[in-house]
Amino acid sequence: MSMGFRRHSTSPLQMNILLIFGLVVAWLASLHIGLHFYSPKVVWGALQDAKTAEDLVITRLRLPRSIIAITCGALLGLSGLHLQSVTRNPLAEPGLLGVNTGAAFAVVLALTLTGTTNLWEIALAAFLGAILTMLVVFTVSGSLHKGMSPVAVLLAGVTLAAMLSSLTQLVLITNESALEDLLFWLAGSFADRELALLQLALPVLLTGMLATLYFAGSLDAMKMDDESAAALGVAVLPTRLGFLALGASLAAAAVAIAGPIVFLGLVAPHLAKRITPNTGHASLAVTTVLLAAVLAHPCWCH
């Protein structure tokens, strides 16, 4: 008599609980691990009352860095999920559509024309540059294809990204002082960022999650071709345009805080789909956000 073995699969809820646990572990590790390792006693004492130089490293450097990383990871993960979903292109991500280069070009212009080094002004310039870039992409792709096809959007984004990247390099070559001031931002980093910038990012992230949950059914239908989605009652063009704009806004908020961060917007949605296959966008969005926040954590860099 043979014995059968039942294959047990992890449910989306169980996976999200595991990811939350992993995020907490990564957050705690980031407070302890760095150039110097601090014991749990030192970290706990610093969080209660920062007095020594070690305490300041934990509360002024490591804690803000960790919070910024979690927020930017969530923003980029959700952005990548939307861009891949509505374009039906597994390689779509914020950088491919020109969001990163648009933000970088706007920051370079702002610094060159005004000489500002204020993080708030740089963040605002980056956000506006990313949004304006996406508006240009929408306009160009709409002129190329009446229904704004995913292919037209991607072609317009790649072309505009290449052009803006060249213009950014041209400005930096002619203005070496701007290059020196912008190296910290153009490199992309979660360190030395002001927590006050979360006032810009958190409302965008909350709006993105609420919109995803509310329109999850339409996003599920968008997995099919446009004709099938329209037959199910989905307004294909407004849905695609709306979530492309939302994806750009999410990426713009992340770029405004931390600079051009690549990789997360591309890989996090793919990994989320692998670990929770055959799930709707409501559950997939939560998994993607948690997974991207874990992957973005600075503790993995040490």
Image (cartoon, rainbow, N blue to C red):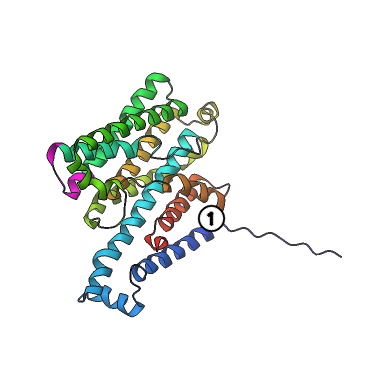
Circle 1 residues within 10 Å: few <14, some 14–19, many ≥20 = some
Name which residue lies at 53% across and 28% down: 231
Query: Can you say which quadrant of the picture contains the N terminus?
Result: bottom right
Task: Please name whichever residue, 225 or 35, is drawn nearer the observer in this view of the structure.
Answer: 35
Quadrant hosting residue 299: bottom left
* Magenta residue check for 236: no
Task: Please name whichever residue, 176 or 187, is drawn nearer the observer in this view of the structure.
Answer: 176
Name which residue lies at 46% across and 29% down: 150
* Magenta residue check for 117: yes
Give how far across and how far down residue 211 sits, in percent.
38, 43
Name the magenta segment's main secondary structure: helix
Residue 166, compared with residue 198, is above or below; it is: above
The outermost residue toward the right is 1
The outermost residue toward the bottom is 41
Task: Please name whichever residue, 218 or 268, is drawn nearer the observer in this view of the structure.
Answer: 268
Name which residue lies at 17% across and 41% down: 111
Q: Which residues are magenta?
A: 113-123
Give how far across and how far down residue 100 sits, in percent.
33, 40
In the image, 43: left or right of 158? Answer: left
Give how far across and how far down residue 44 sits, in percent.
31, 76
Instruction: Find disc 1 in the rendering and name its residue.
Output: 12
Q: Mark 1 is on which residue type? A: Pro
Task: Evaluate whether residue 128 shows in this view.
Answer: yes
Task: Please name whichever residue, 134 or 55, is drawn nearer the observer in this view of the structure.
Answer: 55
Q: Secondary structure at mark 1?
A: helix
Give how far across and how far down residue 166 sits, in percent.
31, 32
Query: Can you say which quadrant of the picture contains the C terminus?
Result: bottom left
Quadrant hosting residue 297: bottom left
Task: Evaluate whether residue 282 shows in this view.
Answer: no
Residue 20, compared with residue 201, is above or below; it is: below
In the image, 232: left or right of 105? Answer: right
